[in-house]
Image (cartoon, helix red, strand yellow):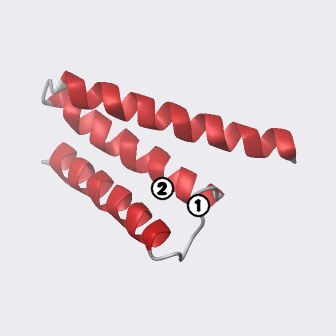
Amino acid sequence: MLFEIIGWGGTAVLLVAYFLVSAKKIDAGSKTYQFLNLFGALAVGVNSFLHAAYPSVGINLAWMAIAVWALARYKKLS
């Protein structure tokens, strides 16, 4: 049950991130957006792995990698 809550929580985080960018409340290049994507994809990825939904695991790993890459660029620019 805990992993179902984690998965749904991750889905909610990803949807909130998308809504905030679409509503122009945050910028797609912001750290906030990248952190929301990172943690949302991590939560959904864990749930997907436990359900053996490997295509979903793959896309969430890619989603996390992009977020980590974007966040690493902030560190280099600082």
User: Is 56 left or right of 13, judged from the image as shown?
Assistant: left
Q: How far apart are marks 1 and 2 (CA)?
A: 6 Å
Instruction: Choose between 23 and 53: the one closer to the eye.
Output: 23
Give residue 4's position: percent from left, percent from top.
16, 48
Element carrying mark 1? helix
- In the depicted structure, whether residue 21 falls above or below residue 49: below
Amino acid type at circle 2 is Leu
- In the depicted structure, whether residue 17 falls above or below residue 60: below
Residue 32 marker: 1
Q: Which residue is drawn at 66% across and 43% down?
A: 71
Question: Badge 2 is on which residue?
Answer: 36
Q: Neighbour class for label 1 at 10 Å: few (<14), some, many (≥20)?
A: some
Give residue 56's position: percent from left, percent from top.
24, 31
Q: Quadrant for residue 43, please give it.
A: top left
Q: Which residue is drawn at 56% across and 51% down?
A: 34
Q: Which residue is drawn at 79% across and 42% down?
A: 75
